[in-house]
Amino acid sequence: MPLTAPSRQLSVTARRLTAVGRGILAADESIATMSARLEAESIPAGERTRRDYRQLLLTAPDLAASVSGVIWCDETFGQLLSDDRPFPEAAHALGILPGIKVDTGTVPFPGVEGALLTRGLDGLDERLASYAERGAAFAKWRAVFDVTTCTERSARVNAQALAQYAASCQAQGIVPIVEPEVLATGSHDLVAAAATARLALGTLFDELQQSDVDLTGIVLKPSFVTPGLDCQEVSARTVATVTYDVLRDTVPGSVPGIAFLSGGHPARDACDFLRELNAIDGAPWAMTFSFGRALVSDALATWAGSPANVTRAQQVLLGRCESAAAAVR
């Protein structure tokens, strides 16, 4: 069946976000998290400094060579750059797609100790309509799965919320990034991580299809399948092989692109995982990055809140983004 015009545009946007050689910059920390990160670098936290930091990221010269889209939180999406342009407008002008985080965080999952449930469906349709009107090309919703506490029930309920979010995004012409993050914290082994990833992804795509979500117009943002960060490391090739096996068995080939989160892994390790994944022949989806701290932490430390350090901080950011982009070329 041929795609309708709205579906075709969603598919075009999803493919643009995951095009070979570029990835997504996740700069969507909440106000509280961003403020804590600023304060950890001895930078006074406030609306102005949060704006200045994210302006530094967006306006790094030729960022679009390695970055296809940037995810922001609601505060940044509504802010103006120092030249009075709204952030989404400036991003479009720079050849970068603007995105928005729309979930409102997690709460304990009822009856399952340690499991989490992501909130944000209340008023979502109205918020998405406003974001679309202001230029949002895509959105993001993160569900969290802990290897030691994930159950079929918690996976199902989180998948249902992701599917409802995705359907609402597509109704507004916005590409949904669906993010089922299997946490890397802990001492679990690779087998346990793979089992949880299979459960989370298999349940997610069952719910997406039941909700009539157009899979050609989404981007999947999963974790790499790795042992827990407190467990013995395995090689990047092993991570890539196991991750690909899980994806091959759970993710339909109609999905245009997969943008991996770094999940707390050092930037070098995350890039190595991605490079090995892209060395596997025959993958039906584009595979790229959607990293946050792995790309921006060193730039934030270099900036330290000083206008005199902006150029040097941007050079650090561009170097990290180019390294990630090189892993997918």
Image (cartoon, helix red, strand yellow):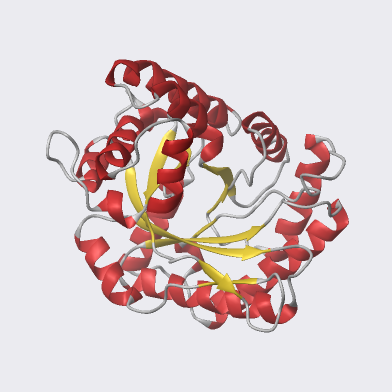
Q: Note whether residue 83 is visible.
A: yes
Frontmost residue, 237 versus 121: 121
Q: Quadrant of residue 266?
A: top right
Q: Provide residue 110's location: percent of width, then percent of height.
A: 63, 82
Frontmost residue, 228 versus 42: 42
Q: Provide residue 277's location: percent of width, then percent of height.
A: 70, 40
Q: Note whether residue 30 is visible.
A: no
Give the farthest residue toward the left.
84
**Above or below: residue 86 compared with residue 74:** above
Tell how many labels. 0
Of the 4 image quadrants, the one containing the C terminus is: top right
Residue occupying image coordinates x 67% and y 39%: 265
**Above or below: residue 72 compared with residue 320:** below
**Above or below: residue 247 compared with residue 90:** below
Q: Provide residue 280's location: percent of width, then percent of height.
A: 73, 40
Residue occupying image coordinates x 56% and y 83%: 210
Q: Quadrant of residue 61?
A: top left
Residue occupying image coordinates x 34% and y 63%: 174
